Image (cartoon, helix red, strand yellow):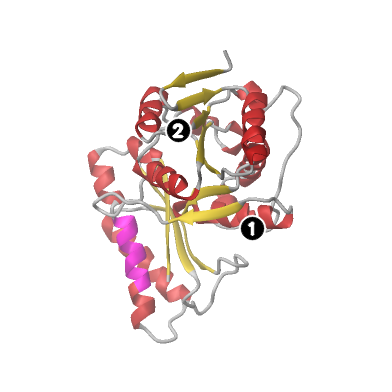
């Protein structure tokens, strides 16, 4: 069986079958397909994207596929959390129409050699330390777009660089899909929700709550200071993190989202992005000015 029905939720494991379903929906001409791509281990951040999809689309498709091509370290892939049974229960409760749940050979055949590259924007932030990461992201997203053919696709703002890169790909390749960037969903202490948070022990999670506090500090400094430089703001956030016990800081940068340029004097349209490592867990976050 290529599909399995659980109440209103249909689980599709075949790319060809999913594409056929999408084509039939398209031919009806009356129903909007809203799509949320995920790698599973669904948390409230994912569910917020899915709820948004339900508001903007008549048909909602969620994909769960842990994409090996966007992992730069094998151990990172091996440690990525999986909770497929629980994920299905959550999608069933939300009354989602389709879950696209392919195996790896449905997405990448043994001779797969195609790669989609947004060349310049991946040279910054996460792209510096995670070589080929964004090539893997754009390749899988374009492939999923071709299979599911959504009218709308929803992504989270926590992964802002990823969204900027996908938006660039969509514009430059004339892909007919509307992109929505949904606000970051946070835990009560401010920590941005992420599947990786499951790897944090209680002490590490307490420290991780300071990531957002540092970003808010940087934004407040910008809002209350005149002509302050990005370098000064970054230095103050860096010191704040060090005092909290965040020792492994990969980057703290202030950038323009339109051209991914580093701002000397920040402006209201810029954003602060950070990546830190707490214990063995890499965490990212950002805020806009």
The answer to which quarter of the image holds residue 119 is bottom right
Query: Is residue 212 found inside the magenta-colored segment of the image?
Result: yes
| Vertical side of 187 occupied by 241: above or below | below
- What's the CA distance linking mark 1 and mark 2? 26 Å
- Expressed as whole percent of the image width and height from the top left, the position of residue 59 reads 52, 39
Query: Is residue 148 found inside the magenta-colored segment of the image?
Result: no
**Is residue 280 something one can see in this rendering?**
no
Mark positioned earlier in the residue sequence (1 or 2): 2
Task: Judge from the rendering whether residue 201 lies leftward or rightward of residue 75; answer left or right.
Answer: left
- Which corner quadrant holds the N terminus? top right
Pointer 2 residue? 40
Task: State the residue in front, 185 or 194.
Answer: 185
- Expressed as whole percent of the image width and height from the top left, the position of residue 97 reads 48, 32
**Which residue occupies 73% across, 40% down?**
115
Kindly report which numbered mark, 1 or 2, lies closer to the viewer in this rendering.
2
- Expressed as whole percent of the image width and height from the top left, the position of residue 23 reads 67, 34
Q: Main secondary structure of the magenta part?
A: helix
**Which residue occupies 36% across, 79% down?**
223
The residue range painted magenta reads: 210-219
| Vertical side of 108 occupied by 166: above or below | below
Numbered label attached to residue 121? 1
Q: Tags 1 and 2 in contact by the CB under 8 Å rule?
A: no
- Expressed as whole percent of the image width and height from the top left, the position of residue 264 reads 53, 77
**Which residue occupies 47% across, 74% down?**
230
Using a 10 Å C-alpha cutoff, classify the residue at mark 1 as few (fewer than 14 neighbours), some (14 to 19) or many (20 or more): many
**Is residue 112 something one can see in this rendering?**
yes
The residue most toward the bottom is 226
The answer to which quarter of the image holds residue 15 is top right
Which element type, helix, strand or loop, lies under badge 2? loop
Task: State the residue in front, 146 or 210.
Answer: 146
């Amino acid at each position: 069986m290529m599909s399995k029905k659980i109440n209103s939720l249909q689980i599709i494991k075949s790319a060809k079958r999913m594409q056929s379903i999408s084509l039939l929906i398209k031919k009806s001409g009356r129903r909007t397909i809203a799509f949320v791509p995920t790698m599973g281990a669904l948390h409230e951040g994912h569910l917020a994207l899915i709820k948004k999809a339900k508001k903007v689309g008549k048909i909602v498709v969620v994909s769960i596929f842990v994409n090996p091509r966007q992992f730069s370290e094998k151990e990172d892939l091996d440690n990525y959390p999986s909770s497929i049974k629980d994920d299905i229960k959550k999608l069933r409760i939300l009354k989602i129409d389709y879950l696209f749940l392919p195996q790896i050979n449905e997405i990448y055949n043994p001779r797969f050699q195609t790669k989609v590259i947004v060349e310049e924007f991946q040279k910054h932030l996460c792209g510096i330390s995670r070589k080929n990461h964004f090539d893997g992201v754009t390749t899988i997203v374009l492939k999923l777009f071709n299979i599911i053919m959504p009218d709308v696709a929803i992504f989270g703002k926590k992964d802002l660089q990823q969204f900027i890169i996908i938006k660039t790909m969509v514009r430059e390749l004339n892909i007919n899909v509307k992109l929505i960037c949904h606000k970051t969903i946070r835990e009560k202490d401010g920590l941005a929700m992420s599947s990786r948070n499951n790897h944090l022990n209680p002490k590490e999670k307490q420290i991780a709550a300071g990531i957002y506090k540092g970003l808010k500090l940087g934004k407040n400094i910008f809002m209350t200071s005149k002509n302050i430089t990005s370098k000064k703001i970054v230095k103050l956030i860096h010191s704040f993190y060090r005092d909290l016990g965040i020792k492994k800081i990969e980057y703290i940068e202030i950038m323009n989202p339109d051209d991914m340029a580093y701002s000397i004097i920040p402006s209201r349209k810029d954003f602060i992005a950070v990546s830190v490592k707490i214990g063995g867990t890499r965490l990212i976050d950002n805020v806009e000015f």
